[in-house]
Amino acid sequence: MATRGVKTSENRKKVVGKALVLLVFIVGAILVVRLTSLTDYLTAEALGKSLDAAGFWAPFVFVIIYAAGVCLFLPGTLLTGLGAAIFGAYWGFVYVWFGAMAGASIAFWIGRTLGRDFAASLIGNRLKKYDDAIERNGFATVLYLRLVYFPFTPMNFGMGLTKVHFWDYVSGTGLGIIVGTFIFTFFIGTLKDIWVSGNWSELLSIKVFFSIGLFIFSFFIPKIIKKIKGDEPAAQPEENG
């Protein structure tokens, strides 16, 4: 019994220790962004020069930068806008999507590895029902939250604290961010092409009006999804026993 008690105490210390590491990481990441000049290098001109120097590997380097930025709580709109401004509407969308997926997966893994055990120890019977429901309906839950533009980075770490399966999280995220990512990169990329060409008459082109229309429509996506969700019967966690 004494040995079991010692092991239990050691396990608790490990769980709390990992949770503290996660907390220090998150606070440190936020402070690095806020208290350093990191964002000064995140401009289309500065980052574009660095990527030009990378040559063939530029897309790969950008994906790494995007993924690191996600884990450091950099604004997703900033990173996505840079991708569209540097690579254009279409390739920008591709590289941004891969960068976002890489960052989301890494952040989830960090949250799951360092914080899941501690979160589980805090969950009471009532919250456990919802945690179990998320495990059963992981894909649908993640997809819905992505479509209504739930804050990207907090959700990445937060989902790692739940019982959602990794592949449900990845597939829900991958599908859920496609629409918003394409709309934003297409809008920024279109304006960038006109700026570079200097042909301002293209501001009246169908492509520009289409991109503006998509951009405006993106703000209504959360309301549309919530409306559809509200018309459906609310999913309730299953009662045990």
Image (cartoon, rainbow, N blue to C red):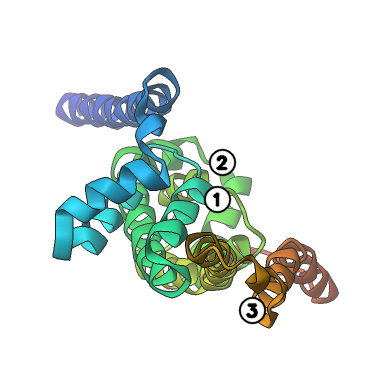
- What crowding class fits label 3: few (fewer than 14 Cα within 10 Å), some (14-19), or many (20 or more)? some
In percent of width and height, residue 113 lies at 28, 45
Q: Nearer the viewer, residue 139 or 121?
A: 139
3D distance between C-alphas at marks 3 and 1: 49 Å
Looking at the image, residue 241 sits to the left or right of residue 157; the answer is right
Residue furthest to the bottom: 206
Could you classify mark 2 by the number of other residues whose Cα lies within 10 Å: few (under 14), some (14-19), or many (20 or more)? few
Say if residue 109 shows up in the picture. no
The numbered mark, 3 or 1, whose residue comes first in the sequence reads 1
For discs 3 and 2, the disc positioned in front in the rendered view: 3
What label does residue 207 carry, if any? Answer: 3
Q: Residue at x 53, y 54 (%)?
A: 131
Report the residue marked by disc 2: 124
Horizontal relation, residue 66 to residue 53: left or right: right
Image height check: is 123 above or below 32? Answer: below
Residue for point 41% across, 24% down:
27
Task: From the image, tell me which residue sits under label 1.
Answer: 128
